[in-house]
Image (cartoon, helix red, strand yellow):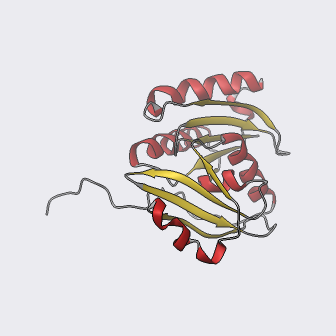
Amino acid sequence: MFLAIDSSLATSVAVVSGEGDILAELSSTDARGHAENIGALIQDTLAIAGHEPAAITHVVMGVGPGPFTGLRVGMAAAQAFGLSRNLPVVPVISHDAIAHGAGDVVTVTDARRGEVAYSVYVGDAVKRRILGPALTKPEDLDSALAQHATLPRREVSSISAGALGQVAQKYVAASIELDPPAPQYLRAPDVTVAS
């Protein structure tokens, strides 16, 4: 049983079965209220799924791309839940959820500050991202994707934690080796420590 959490855009939480079925999923469209919403979303999603926290075997962590504060809230919640129950935490690039079940596709999300984040997915392998996530200005997206111009684009304003959990379930079932749980910020922080 997978508890999936993503806060790379809005906040989404889902419970996905070991067979990849979405048992419950709740989201908040508040792009700035991640910290206020995430605890209740986790509790309510588990209740709707009809499972106690003890039934969870894996915690899925959406690692972005996303803005600093929002992304960190979801990642911290996933790590805290995993550590509190000694469960494996499965980091998944949030764009992988957008591409789930979409065939060959380019995923695009708003990266704020006049930029977009994009990734390219090709083939039918379990792990099939061949480019990205990367950052560009919307007006430069066509040239950045010149080699993939024929692929359809899927642009979304939220990530489905249910789809994220389904991707993680496939990765775990296929024993895919994943990258460490590092946030995909794609740009340097606005604030730096003075030297």
- Furthest toward the left, the residue is 195
From the viewer's side, name the closer residue of 74 and 190: 190
Count of marks placed on residues = 0
**Residue 184 visible from this viewpoint:** no
Q: Residue furthest bottom?
A: 147
The relative height of residue 46 versus residue 187 in the rendered view (above or below) is above
- Where residue 94 sits: x, y (%)? 60, 52
Give the x, y percent position of residue 147: 63, 78
Q: Position of residue 103 (x, y in %)?
A: 79, 61
Q: Quadrant of residue 129?
A: bottom right
The residue furthest right is 19
User: Looking at the image, which is closer to me, 148 or 32?
Assistant: 148
Please give left or right for residue 170 compared with residue 186 in the image: right
Which quarter of the figure is the C terminus placed in? bottom left
Residue 79 visible: yes
Residue 188 lies left or right of residue 57; in this view the side is left
Q: What residue is at 44 percent from the left and 41 percent from the top?
A: 70
Residue 82 lies in what quarter of the image? top right
The answer to whether 22 is drawn above or below residue 90 in the figure is: above
Name the foreground residue: 95 vs 181.
95
Quick one: quadrant of the N terminus? top right
Question: Where is residue 42 drawn, in percent x and y?
Answer: 61, 29
- Determine whether, in the image, residue 92 is placed left or right of residue 112: right
At x 65%, y 73%, the residue is 148
Rendered position, 106 above or below 22: below
Identity of the residue drawn at 53% across and 73% down: 143
Q: Quadrant of residue 133?
A: bottom right
